[in-house]
């Protein structure tokens, strides 16, 4: 895994991989994922998508059903990033 972004527990990016067990342990203990990030925490979801380098994106952001935002912007950027 190369990146995790959450609304409550921060973000982590590590091209070498992120231990799912360690990430879940931090979140269970109410700690920030920023503690295990190999690079500085992105400023927002779009910055995270630009820098995580993932091949797959699971988008689970609360969405406005009329505009599709912010999910539409997240998915559009991910597709543009390849």
Image: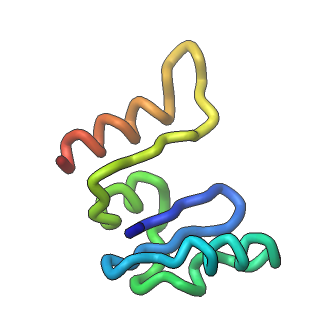
The chosen color scheme is: rainbow
Q: Position of residue 73 (x, y in %)?
A: 38, 36
Q: Residue at x 63, y 35 (%)?
A: 62
- Name, please, the residue furthest toward the top: 66
Q: Position of residue 29 (x, y in %)?
A: 81, 78
Q: Residue at x 41, y 67 (%)?
A: 1
The part of the image, by quadrant, that contains residue 28 is bottom right
Check the image and report above or below for 60 versus 66. Answer: below
Check the image and report above or below for 30 versus 3. Answer: below
Q: Nearer the viewer, residue 72 or 21?
A: 21
Going by the image, does 36 lie left or right of 50?
Answer: right
Check the image and report above or below for 9 versus 25. Answer: above
Going by the image, does 54 lie left or right of 20?
Answer: left
The part of the image, by quadrant, that contains residue 38 is bottom left
What count of labels does the image hold? 0
- Name, please, the residue furthest toward the right: 29
Q: Position of residue 55 (x, y in %)?
A: 27, 54
Q: Residue at x 33, y 49 (%)?
A: 56
Q: Position of residue 16 (x, y in %)?
A: 33, 81
Going by the image, does 23 lie left or right of 39?
Answer: right
- Name, please, the residue furthest toward the front: 21
The part of the image, by quadrant, that contains residue 47 is bottom left
């Amino acid at each position: 895994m190369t990146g995790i972004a959450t609304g409550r527990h921060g973000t982590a990016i590590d091209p070498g991989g992120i231990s799912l067990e360690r990430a879940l342990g931090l979140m269970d203990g109410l700690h920030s994922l920023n503690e295990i990030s190999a690079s500085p925490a992105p400023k927002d979801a779009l910055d995270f998508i630009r820098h995580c380098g993932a091949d797959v994106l699971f988008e689970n952001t609360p969405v406005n059903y009329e505009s599709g935002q912010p999910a539409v912007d997240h998915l559009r950027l991910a597709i543009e990033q390849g």
